[in-house]
Amino acid sequence: MSKIHVSTTINGDAAEFLCDPRETLLDVLRDRLGLTGAKEGCGTGDCGACSVTLDGRLVCSCLVLGAEAEGREIATVEGIAPGETLHPLQRKFIEHAALQCGICTPGILVAAKALLEKNPDPTETEVRYWLAGNLCRCTGYDKIIRAVMDAAAEMREVA
Amino acid sequence: MRYLSPASFDDAVALAAEAPGVTRFLAGGTDVLVQMRADIITPDTLIDIKKIPGTHDIARTPDGGWTIGVAVTGAEMREQDDLGADWPGLVEAMDLIGSTQVQGRATLTGNLCNASPAADSVPAMIAAGVTLTVTGPDGNRTVAAEDIPTGPGQTSLAKGELISAVHVPPRGAGGGDAYLRFIPRTEMDIAVVGCGVNLSVEGDTITAARVALGAVAPTARLVPEAAAALVGTTLGDAALDALATAASAACAPIDDKRGTVRFRTHIAGVLAKRAAKIAYDRARKAQ
């Protein structure tokens, strides 16, 4: 099987890789580029653990082929923190203990960041619906929602 | 598997026509990639249509209708306020599908061609009178949305044919549409029953109507008897009861974990009434 050469941008940096036509973007990120933040939960777009943005749009990277990344801009959880400083969402997740096992956390951070860029002042209901595609089996969600609401409030004050 | 991304529909058709074995077209991939992973399908050729110019566009046509590109996502439809003002039912139906992540990829055309009887956008498309341009080796033909699915997972598209554009008719004055589905929770589920209603009014009287049902038959279906129960009425109790009776009579559902035959048949009537009320209110406000 011949491989496909793909040139793309990941977290602002140019990236190139070779992949099989059937490989998903999630496979490429984890196995070829060493970006293991995005997790594989279900592999069928149900759990959201592999969430990334593709040209700014929130998607499940398990439902995108690596070959589709050609010429696109991808953002993963590895790009959320500016340098050594945690992103407010990351800090609030720690403060609120909004994670236990942590498998869902990278996807939720990416999804929550995408929400706050679109809507800096969401209601709790809007946060819950936006994150409905990010499954967490540990926390019961309340702490996650509180962390996102608190981060949103802090980001509005700074902005 | 070969992955191809042609730059025109003519090229896509030519590639599909000569491709040996199993060919699939890729738009949002929310069904195709899941089916590939589950080994339900093993394509020899996967043709990604998203590099074709125009496939990401939502455009108003000179007659006041809309042309929606086949790669336009649910999220993009939701963000096009004028489309939602004309056809709120269609946009809401698409918006009900899956999560935020799925909305970032899923398309109307994919939902139609996946041919699930429970596809949420399909009854709304049928009710709205959506037509599709089908491009194949013999050129283009125009097909009504209700004529694309022929059974669960089956469509009327021949080898080498694909949908190249979605056409939504002009809304016109005094028109409104609505789509409702029943699921046992509030989000992220598959329709037990779905119902789309599209109607036009003059004053308080309904002058035209289309009613479509999903998840109650092997395909989503247009129900002319249900529409006939609405036309000429002001949506009084008698009209609503006649609508519900006609909707329930059109059901030929299966019993499964999501709902029994009896439940689905009853709920089809209930949803038809509720969707008709919403569409009627929207239509009267749009005069």
Image (cartoon, rainbow, N blue to C red):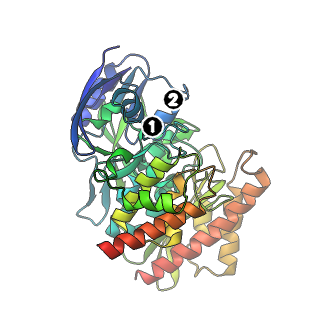
Residue A24 in view: no
Residue B8 at x, y = what percent? 22, 36
Query: How many numbered markers are drawn?
Result: 2
Q: Secondary structure at mark 2?
A: helix
The amino acid on which the numbered mark 1 sits, given as a three-letter code, is Cys
Measured from the top left, where is residue B271 in percent x and y? 64, 66
Label 1 vs label 2, nearer the camera: 1
**In what quadrant of the picture does the N terminus of chain B appear?**
top left
Which amino acid does the dot numbered 2 rest on?
Arg
Judging from the image, mark 1 belongs to the subunit labelled: A
| Residue B37 numbered mark, or none | 2
Q: Identify which residue, B185 or B51, lies in the foreground.
A: B185
Instruction: Bin the neighbour count of mark 1 within 10 Å (Cα to Cα): few under 14, some 14-19, many 20 and up.
Output: many
Residue B287 horizontal/vertical position (percent): 40, 83
Query: Compared with residue B226, is residue B34 higher up or lower down, i.e. above or below?
Result: above
Residue A103 vertical placement versus B263 (above, below): above
Residue B96 at what x, y percent from top left?
A: 52, 58
> Which residue is farthest front?
A84
What's the residue at 74%, 46% (across, down)? B257
Q: Is residue B239 left or right of residue B147?
A: right
Asked whether disc 1 touches disc 2, contact meaning CB atoms under 8 Å apart, the reply is yes
Q: Give the crowd class for mark 2: few <14, some 14-19, many >=20 residues within 10 Å.
A: some
Quarter of the view holding residue A16: top left
**Mark 1: secondary structure:** helix
Left-right relation of B155 to B25: right
The image quarter containing residue A25 is top left
- Which residue is tagged 1? A62
- Residue A86 bears which disc, if any? none
Name the residue at the bottom extreme: B203
Q: Residue at x 45, y 37 (%)?
A: A62
